[in-house]
Amino acid sequence: MKTIGLIGGMSWESSIEYYRLINEAVRARLGGLHSARCILHSLDFAEIEPLQRLGEWDEAAKRIAAAAQQVEKGGADFLLLCTNTMHKAADAIQRSISIPLLHIADATAQAVKRRSLKRAGLLGTKVTMEETFYRGRLSSQHGLEVIVPSEEDRCTVHRIIYEELCVGRVLDNSRLEYVRIMDRLIERGAEAVILGCTEIGLLVRQDDCCVPVFDTTRIHAEAAVEYALSGQQ
């Protein structure tokens, strides 16, 4: 079994989910008392979020790259960045280490394509929904058509992530807002909805939507287990 490197804390609310999902998947595959070999470096999100807000992405990338180097030195065979938004710095982080970084957008796109779907609505932080590092990757490298909410709805999605989900507040009214926004994406032709922030799965689930929902946290965790156990007898 390969050792999984995890950089979490952005926020730790979803990092818990990564740890749980990875270990549940390993136990399901191997049985008995098996659990995942993993190394978790959890950052202080209060130090990263202001850099995101102020657009200081190079500094954020440096801090995460330093964490990635520590995880590699600790014995990880590959790396997961337990956040969609900070994949904006994925290329810089990958250049700083010699082990592979398992990109969350690639794993998600592969899951969507396995269902023979081509047009997906995307929810996430504003930078994830608006910039090309994520939605552009889904389109240019994987051939998916990506639909994002209106500007007003993007602001709502973003606010709920940072003001509520990242601090452990899961509110029914916010769930209803997300359901409304997902319904609008479906009206515009979305065949699926990608939960492109690792906290969103804490708020909405498949039962809240009439088209397939792709939870990037679960998909990323399952892809990590598949990679960790590749070649396992």
Image (spheres, grey):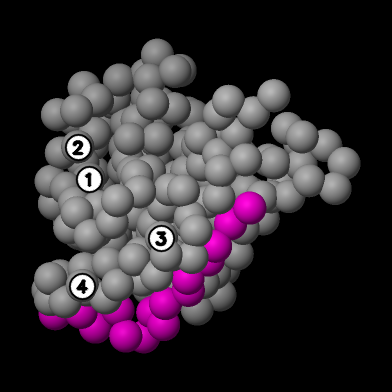
Q: Is residue 230 above or below residue 80?
A: above
Q: Which residue is mark 1?
A: 134
Calculate the distance from the C-alpha at mark 3 to the C-alpha at mark 1.
25 Å
What residue does disc 4 label?
A: 62
Q: Which mark is residue 137?
A: 2
- Badge 3: residue crowd in 10 Å (few <14, some 14–19, many ≥20): many
CB atoms at circles 2 and 4 under 8 Å apart?
no
Q: Label 1 amino acid? A: Tyr
Task: Examine the rendering and report whether any part of residue 157 can be seen.
Answer: yes
Residue kind at label 2, given as amino acid type: Arg
Q: Is residue 19 left or right of residue 135?
A: right
N-terminal-most mark, 2 or 3: 3
Residue identified by numbered label 3: 72
Mark in the foreground, 2 or 4 = 4
What residue appears at the point 49 percent right and 29 percent down from the top-left corner?
212
The earlier-in-sequence mark between 2 and 4 is 4
